[in-house]
Amino acid sequence: MKKNIFKIGVVAAALTLGMTSCEDFLNAPTIDSYSAGTFYKDDAQLEQGVNYLYNSPWFDVIRPYIGVGEIMSGNYYWGTDMGTSGYGPYLYWSLDGTLQTLKDMSYSLWSVNAHCNTVITNILSSNGPSVEKKKQCIGEALTWKAFAYFMLARAYGEVPIVHDNGQLLNEKDADGKPMFSQVKKADRASVYDYTILTLRKAMDLLPVNKNPKTDGRIDFYTAQALLAKVYLTKAGVSGSLNADDLKKASELADSVIVYSGRELMPVYSDIFRGQNNISEESLLAWRWKCPTVNWTQQNALQADMAMNGFDEWGPWGGWNGISTDLQEAFGITALDDPSDPSRPLKDKDQRRKATYMTAGDVYEYFWQDKGGFDLLRFLYGEGYRDGGPMGGPGVGCYGGGAFMVKHLHGNNADHIAAFGYAPDRNMSSSLATHLLRLSDVYLIYAEAEALQNGNQVTGKALERFNAVRHRAGADEKTSATWEDVWNERRLEFAGEGDRWYDFVRVAYYDEAFVAAKLNAQHRNTYWGLDELWKPYYESGVWNRAQLEADNKIGYDETPFPAFPGKVAFTLPMPTEDVATNPNMATSAPAEHVDVAATYSYDYIKF
């Protein structure tokens, strides 16, 4: 039986209002279920009623967050399986509406919109909480709604605008047919305008005096920072860069940097450790928690990305990892000798080791109860982990030889050290997923300024660009260009689900640049790494030159398909939605909407 994913998203909120989050600062209510009329009795209960927007509705975005953001962009490799549950379609830019993870993402994003709309309606109907708390919680819901539309616009391009779920469900045409099955797509510019409208309203409501070091909730500067990113993205949507949008992007980013009181965390890797789930670096994050009453409230990424044996729950991520192309961008690959005297100089950028592990890497913050995590010892050493060695990277796991570090919490002892409790099952962690960080705001400012200044990064923009590099341990630059900023974004946010959208943003006005970059990537894997790594672990001999001469190790030179061009920048809507409503097809025309004249949040009154 076919399912209308779009309709499910429209009505989802009415079916799951009882879901709540349980992050430390988002404690679950003490009752099992509630309605808006009986639960929202005071400020604490109102805040708890919004908490689940920080996790549950987003759960099915987790895998396509990597698939779209990292695999399509050439940062990550997750195999070549072209089935409906595989990740080959992301690797080869050949997605269609039957791909399960893509359908899951569509469902989740529409569900987020529906939940946010319903939560806002219920808050407005409650009488117990204070006006200040109502404003705060509605502002949080509006920011999440805007982020969902920001993802929809960048991923699917032209999508419907659902301002009021109840109204859409109740509307019928002259023949009595439901309007939800006839709704039309709005064009990209209109979707961005609606996102901006929503964020502007959120900024009107959100408090500015939050403490980002201890609070972690969305505040005024979260919405302002996200708005800066939306304006930077929207600037090129017409095919040429809009000077007014670029100016707004840099002004908004500058305001966050100057007035929010936030600073970059001194140590890059600390951003991704559990004890720093809440920090001034993290402006917006999915805030997961385990143990949890409701499945979907927990972070499941470690199960997908950590090697079998990395924790007590048996993750299965040894078959995927960091692409060879991203390794080359950082300057350290699985083929590089860990004992090379020049290695420390080549590997001075702290973001490399905080993003992926390869031969020679040891981590003090993983396996703390065992004195740290040693990758080669894990792969080849006897008795280092339960179950013994698993075989080398060329035989037993991902042939690229570089494994994700971000999104991993470590073993049970590491989770206890960070959160005070162990995971209660597989696919379960409390590690936050950071979606918008302060360093992003620094680079948004630098990029927007460069695009207004002949692609040159100068003055305050160069200072902020260098602040990001300085924190990473990379050499500061005396001069920089727009492309330097664009490349810097890759290193700063690698693995964080955003790189593909950098390509999308630039493709709006310079598709040739993007296509050339993607076609030049090395998206295949190495082969024969076991022949190189295992002897090195056993005897300290790095025999790369001889192995290459004997044709026993190398990079897979199989020709990679050419980037298909513009079509790849619009992901297909689920097949079921298109079957129910042909207006959802990628080829179907979209309407331009005068957002300011059509939509309003004037109904939000106190």
Image (cartoon, rainbow, N blue to C red):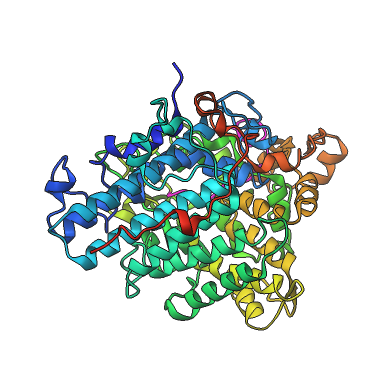
**Where's the C terminus, which quadrant?**
bottom left
| Predominant secondary structure, magenta span | loop
Q: Which residue is at 12% across, 59% downward? A: 128
Q: Position of residue 471 (x, y in %)?
A: 57, 72
* Residue 179 location, quadrant: top left
The reply to whether the magenta stretch includes residue 484 is: no
Q: Residue pushed farthest top? A: 1
Q: Is residue 408 magenta?
A: yes
In magenta, the rendered stretch is 389-409
Depth check, front residue: 413 or 131:
131
User: Residue drawn at (88%, 39%), measured in percent from left and top?
Assistant: 549
Whether residue 428 is visible, yes or no, is: no
Q: Is residue 197 left or right of residue 17?
A: right
Looking at this view, name the residue that lies furthest to the bottom: 459
Residue 338 x/y as whole percent: 68, 54
Q: Is residue 19 left or right of residue 104?
A: left
Residue 476's place in the image compared with 19, above or below, is below
Residue depicted at 75% across the width and 71% down the height: 455
Q: Can residue 573 be seen from the camera position used here?
A: yes
User: Quadrant location of residue 447?
Assistant: bottom right
| Left or right, 173 with reference to 122 | right
The residue at the point 34 percent across, 48 percent down is: 117
